Amino acid sequence: MKLQILFIIIFLNISGLHAQNLYTIQPSVMSIKGTSTLHGWELKATGVRGTCEMNFDGQQIKEIKSLYLEIPVKNLKSTEQSSMMDGKVYTALQSTSAPNIIFHLERINSISINGGGCDINAEGTFAIAGVSKRENITVHGIIGTDGTISFIGSKKIEMSDYNIEPPKAFLGAFTTGNEVEISFKINFAKNLIISSN
């Protein structure tokens, strides 16, 4: 009797298994641009981490069930290779207490076909410098010939919305503007896993 129960449990567990379209991040491009009292500036992000779960209808994205991105603050480097600028940024972003910038998808508002890809309007939570805020964002999704999925777009944010004091240098002679623009091309490749509910 116990053996029969064991077989039933195993069968139910196997029946509950299903394949998920889980994608993991590949080398991607991300930058943060802003202005200052002296000149424009730019930071490049490396070591971006993340996952995405999607479903498809043929060669079109039908549904994005989840998306998570994590950018280590200390992986942000100024294009001018200024260690002083980098240090000011790390301090402003509170890299010790909030070591990562995080984006977590909350909901998809719309997915519409546009050319060889699709435009996606979504809402997600940004966590920056220890402050979380829900934002709206629109990106363009493209499926590559190798099956790679790319999300391309940009997002302007106000540093003051995240209680960030714009970095200053040279006794205040160099002060960054409040608005910054995050530009990105995030690439994902499929990682088929088996899981159970």
Image: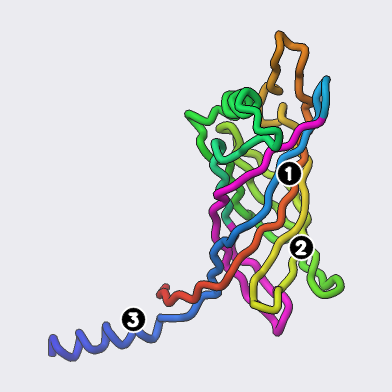
Q: Which residue is mark 1?
A: 182
SS assignment for the magenta stretch, majority: strand
In the picture shown, does residue 21 fall above or below 128?
A: below
Circles 2 and 1: CB atoms closer than 8 Å: no
Q: Does residue 77 appear left or right of residue 197 in this picture?
A: right
Picture coordinates of residue 9, whole percent (x, y):
27, 83
Quadrant assignment, res 73: top right
State the residue at coordinates (62%, 29%).
86
Going by the numbered disc 1, the residue's amino acid type is Ile
Number of on-image labels: 3
In the image shown, does 155 or 131 lie closer to the viewer?
155
Horizontal relation, residue 120 to residue 88: left or right: right
Q: Position of residue 188 (x, y in %)?
A: 61, 65
User: Which of marks 1 and 2 precedes in the sequence?
Assistant: 2
Residue 120: which numbered mark, if any? 2
Reading the chain from its start, which is encountered first: label 3 or label 2? 3
Specify the segment rendered in magenta.
Answer: 40-67
| Residue plotted at (55% across, 74% down) | 21
- Residue type at numbered disc 3: Asn
Which of the two marks, 3 or 2, is nearer to us in this view? Answer: 2
**Which mark is drawn over residue 13?**
3
| Residue 56: in magenta span | yes
Spatial CA distance of label 2 from label 1 is: 17 Å
Q: Residues within 10 Å of mark 1 (few under 14, many from 20)?
A: some
Check residue 172 in the rendering and tell me which mark sits there, or answer none: none
Residue 87 position in % (x across, y down): 59, 25
User: Disc 3 to disc 1, how far (Cα)?
Assistant: 44 Å
Q: Residue at x 77, y 27 (%)?
A: 178
Query: Is 131 on the left or on the right of 120, as rendered?
Result: left
